[in-house]
Amino acid sequence: MRRLDERLRLAMAVLKELNRQPVCRTELEKRTVKKLGTHATFEGIFHYLVNNGYVKKSEARHRAPYVITEKGVKLLEALQ
């Protein structure tokens, strides 16, 4: 149960950062891992959020910033 709580907090931190402003993946990882989590937990949560449509790239270019989607905003509201 503790791991689930940690993952939910990390997901919420990622979504909060993206709700503030679009950020590239590397910068997003630096900001969230500094607060909580590890590289491995960030990667797992980030890929989950992208694959399920909560987060997406703003453009097709390689280092484009990520943005939160409407689905992600609803998840953020539910987690708070």
Image (cartoon, rainbow, N blue to C red):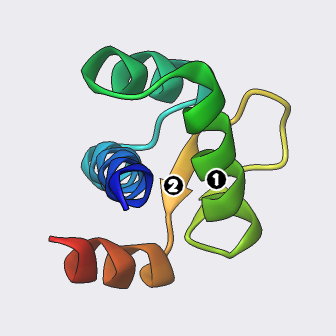
Tell me, yes or no, whether the two marked residues, 2 and 1, touch with CB atoms within 8 Å.
yes
Q: Which residue is mark 1?
A: 58
Q: Which residue is painted at 64% across and 53% down in the image?
A: 58
Q: CA distance from mark 2 to mark 1?
A: 6 Å
Judged left or right of residue 69, residue 45 is: right
Residue type highlighted by circle 2: Val
Residue type highlighted by circle 1: Ser
Which quadrant of the structure image shows residue 55? bottom right
Camera-side residue: 63 or 48?
Answer: 48
State the quadrant of the N terminus. bottom left
Where does the image place residue 54, in percent across and percent down from the top left? 55, 71
Disc on res. 8: none
Where does the image place residue 40, in percent across and percent down from the top left? 65, 28
Where does the image place residue 38, in percent across and percent down from the top left? 50, 22
Judged left or right of residue 14, residue 62 is: right
Q: Which residue is painted at 21% across and 79% down in the image?
A: 77
Which quadrant of the structure image shows residue 37? top left
State the quadrant of the C terminus. bottom left
Judged left or right of residue 70, residue 52 is: right
- The answer to which of marks 2 and 1 sits earlier in the sequence is 1
Residue lying furthest left: 80
Q: Which residue is painted at 29% across and 71% down in the image?
A: 76
Q: Which residue is mark 2?
A: 67
Judged left or right of residue 27, residue 15 is: left
Where does the image place residue 31, in percent across and percent down from the top left? 36, 21
Q: Residues within 10 Å of mark 1 (few under 14, many from 20)?
A: some
Q: Residues within 10 Å of mark 2 (few under 14, many from 20)?
A: many
Which quadrant of the structure image shows residue 62? top right
